[in-house]
Amino acid sequence: MVRLKRSMALAFGGTIMAAQIALGAGLTDADTKFLQSAFGPTVQDEIVAHMTADEVNQLHEVMNQPFTSTQPEIRRALVSDYLFAIHSRQCQAWAVVHSGELCPPPADPSVLPGKNVADQQCNACHLFGTSLAPAFRALARTDKASEARLADAIRAGHEMSPMYLSPEQIKALSLYINSLK
């Protein structure tokens, strides 16, 4: 029954309805609070709203492994990896249908250039964050996502790999990250 409701919600583009089904399919209030505080997404966000019931149940299981209750960094890393795997699957499915596009576009078309930079250059570490790299949503809650701060950080040397972004790409990336507030 949950899968039927979920399919209907997605077919009609009902993000809020899909989010309610995701909650009913296995995410508790504590799960959704953890997701939002640690990574930013709410149940209305695309990644959660478009998960299958099995993915939602698995996410709940990953978040609630008994051994992680005393090791929050391990919990965060496991959830981050799982969310990134789901995001990658969703982007692959999108790319099959929409040739030439890596992932679904953002709701606000003005931030598409920055999202494209993020998808191509930054998501592996910053989409949900790692122990060394803050998540985009965490950056958006600070002043670290300003155009000047991003340019300084990239110019000073990127921690994981050397990279170059043009001033236009940095401006677009800053605009995209700040849209995630």
Image (tube, grey):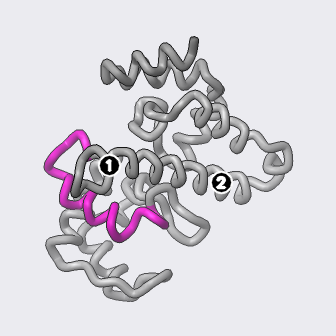
Residue 77 falls in which quadrant of the image? bottom right
Q: Is 102 placed left or right of 142 in the picture? A: left
Locate residue 98, reporting x and y percent.
Answer: 24, 47
The residue positioned 32% from the left and 67% from the top of the image is 120
Say which amino acid is labelled 2: Arg
Locate residue 8, reporting x and y percent.
Answer: 40, 16
The residue positioned 46% from the left and 41% from the top of the image is 41
Task: Answer above or below: position of 114 versus 12.
Answer: below
Q: Is 45 placed left or right of 149 in the picture? A: right
Say which amino acid is labelled 1: Val
Locate residue 112, reporting x and y percent.
Answer: 20, 53
Q: Secondary structure at mark 1?
A: helix
Residue 7 falls in which quadrant of the image? top left
Q: Which residue is mark 1?
A: 96
Locate residue 113, reporting x and y percent.
Answer: 18, 59
Magenta residues (range):
105-126
Q: Which residue is mark 2?
A: 76
Residue 56 falls in which quadrant of the image? top right
Q: Secondary structure at mark 2?
A: helix
Mark found first going from the N terminus, 1 or 2: 2
